[in-house]
Amino acid sequence: MIHRLMAAACVFASAAHADPLFQDISAGLPDHHYTGGWEHFVGGGVSAFDCSGDGLPDLVAAGGTAPLLLLKNVSDTGKIAFERAVIDPEITGATGAYPVDMNGDGLLDLYVMRVGPDRVLEGGADCQFTDVTEAWGIPQTDQWTTAFTAWWEDGASFPTLAIGHYVDRANPDGPFGACDTNTLLTPTIGTSLRYTAQELSPGYCALSMLAAEDARGLKSLRISNDRHYYVSGGAEQMWDIAEQRFLTEADGWAKVSLWGMGIASRDLTGDQRDELMLTSMGDQLMQVAQADGSYRGAPYDIGTYAQRPYVPGDGRPSTGWHASFADVNNDGRADLFIAKGNVDQMPGMAMRDPNNLLIQGADGRFTEVGDTAGVADIARSRGAALADFDGDGLLDLAVVNRRAPMRMYRNVTPEAGRFVRIAVRGAGGNRFAVGARVIVTVGDAVQSQQITIGGGHAGAVLAPLHFGIGDAAEASVQVRWPDGTQSDPMRVTAGDQITVTQPD
């Protein structure tokens, strides 16, 4: 397994390489904490997406008992700046929010997860949002929502939604062993947006969901679960979307139980099969996609398990939350960020637990640089977003913390490699082409990324896809659309962003 990762990474061995460096510019943000009692021990997501139409990612951050925060990006090149935008009515109780174009108008809406009834906000011009929860027929329950993902069935005008729920707060025998069921929301056939709810069980306290093409090349729903509350009998889950069933060991789906918090997905080998990163308490588990459609745990020496803090002062196991694969130094190899932090005061877990920034080397192994890169914060981090907030071609970092101020880090890596950025526009109701795969080739090196909505921990990035290309002057780009058709190859010059549009 490690040899496949090494072979793919070595193609870029001669590419421009720089040690990542970030500048803490958190002082310029509005004061924002993710607050609350035990119902907000989990959650605390942040999502990056363009709601103003200026090409720069804006931010929405969960507040727990504090209000949901919307930040409009007003940056110039070389300077990151945000202004607080109004959400009316104010929303509290939010664990996270995901951007998704639910009505197919080309503007991103927000699905807001809450402790209690969820809310859906329709996106308008210039980051204006309107509550359409009732108008769009979103079923209202008092469940504790902690996970979300969305996909489009073939030919559908509107997305199918999967909603993950944590502990059933109404269960008098809880909280241990009292995991709630999950919910599928299926759009009704017609021209208006209405949903029908279907129970998805068993539920094992979902903290992250991701609908994506799996190692078999089929669309599936990956669910990461927290064994802290399911205690025994539960496991990670993979639900086959076409067959409407959970995969078992007979399908090659190995039973894995962990304290699942978040999911990251990225093709690390160029074979157009995504590896999976599963955050947890203790080991962070990477699963390597196999040619037979199964997954295997990555070898220990790959450097991604990150089971203990890497700064002195606390040798207890780490707690991982949000994870993101992203090329922070543009050398053509995906790196890995993991937000870390104690649930609250769990005595068996590290309290001084800095966030990880793991840089992938030419041999396919990952090396910790969080401290030298300037992102080794020891607050109780939860959600995170890696996006180019100032448009300078380097991915910056936003982090939401529990009971501590939100952080913003500007990427100032010297002598970074070059990049290309690919925006994709789908046909029909799936305007953001969710389910498509973008393939970028430089010489013999192949990278690919899926367009998905979900994963992470309570938030994600929905923006043009960023690819580092090292010292290359150009790259070849193709898009495999959700229906399986593929665009013709096209050339893109380093530093450019192109938009690829699916034919009707």
Image: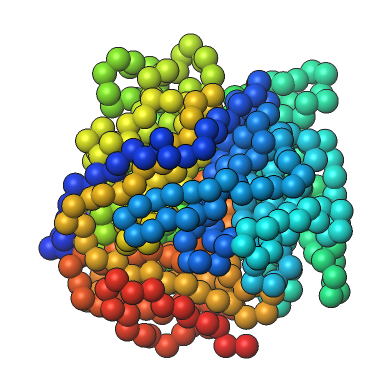
The residue that appears at 63% across and 58% down in the rendered structure is: 127
Residue 289 percent across, percent down from the top left: 42, 56
Residue 192 occupies which quadrant of the picture? bottom right
Left or right: 304 with respect to 457? left
Residue 298 percent across, percent down from the top left: 35, 44
The residue that appears at 47% across and 80% down in the rendered structure is: 500
Residue 252 percent across, percent down from the top left: 52, 52
Rendered position, 183 above or below 351: below
Q: Nearer the viewer, residue 21 or 145?
A: 21
Residue 205 appears anywhere in the view: no
Residue 282 occupies which quadrant of the picture? top left
Q: Nearer the viewer, residue 301 or 407?
A: 407
Q: Pick out the residue farthest to the top.
A: 347
Rendered position, 141 above or below 49: above
Residue 128 appears anywhere in the view: yes
Left or right: 82 with respect to 38? left
Q: Nearer the viewer, residue 149 or 84?
A: 84
The residue that appears at 74% across and 26% down in the rendered structure is: 178
Q: Quadrant of the C terminus?
A: bottom right
Left or right: 216 with respect to 129? left
Residue 268 occupies which quadrant of the picture? bottom left
Rendered position, 150 above or below 342: below
The residue that appears at 44% across and 43% down in the rendered structure is: 398
Colour theme: rainbow
Residue 397 percent across, percent down from the top left: 40, 46
